[in-house]
Amino acid sequence: MTLWLLDASVLLATEDSDDDHHGDAVWLLGAEDPLATLDLAFYEVTNVAVRAWGDPVAATRLCDRVVALADDGGLVRADAPLLADAAALATEHGISAYDAGYVAAARRAGARLVSCDLRDLVPRGLAVLPSQARAGRA
C-alpha cells in the first residue's frame, strides 16, 4: 500500500463539487491506502473556506477531515528540521515555502505527495494529481 500525503488543495477539492479534482479527491479519502497531511493544512483549508468561500461551516468540515487523518496517525508536524528542508526545497525549485513544506513532509513520511497544484508541484514532478493516485500511475 502507498502512503499518500495530501496537500490542502486535495482536501479543499473534497469540499468543492465544482473542482475538477473533486471526484478523485473524494475517492482517495475513502480508499484503503493510508493518508496523511501536514499540520499546515489546518490553516490553509480554514483560510480558503472562510476568506474565499465565506463558509465557516465548510471550514469546520475540512478541519474535521484533518483531525480524522491525525487520529489515524497521519499528521506530520512542522519542526525545525522540516522547516529547514522546506526552505532548501523552496530555493531549489522556486516554489513557496508552503508548497515546499508539503514536499518535505511527504519525503519525511516516505509518502507520495498528492496535490491539485498544476502550477508548481505537479509539473515539477514533486506531486501527483488525485486522478493519478487513483489510477495507481504514481
Image (cartoon, rainbow, N blue to C red):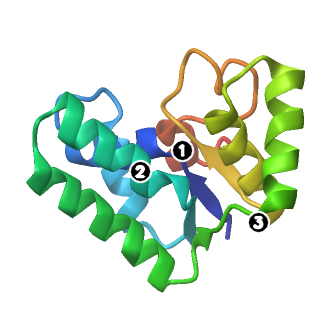
Q: Is residue 64 left or right of residue 70?
A: left
Q: Is residue 104 left or right of residue 75?
A: right
Q: Which residue is mark 3?
A: 109
Q: Which residue is mark 2?
A: 43
Q: Is residue 31 left or right of residue 55?
A: right
**Where 54 falls versus 58 (above or below)?**
above
Mark 2 packing: few (<14 Cα in 10 Å), some, or many (20+)? few
Spatial CA span between label 1 and label 3: 22 Å
Mark 3 packing: few (<14 Cα in 10 Å), some, or many (20+)? some
As drawn, the residue found furthest toward the front would be 80
Q: Are marks 1 and 3 in contact (CB under 8 Å)?
A: no
Q: Secondary structure at mark 2?
A: helix
Spatial CA span between label 2 and label 3: 20 Å
- Image depth: mark 2 or mark 1 in front: 2
Q: Secondary structure at mark 1?
A: helix
Of mark 2 and mark 1, the one earlier in the sequence is 2
Mark 1 packing: few (<14 Cα in 10 Å), some, or many (20+)? few
Q: Which residue is mark 1?
A: 135
- The amino acid beneath tag 3 is Ala
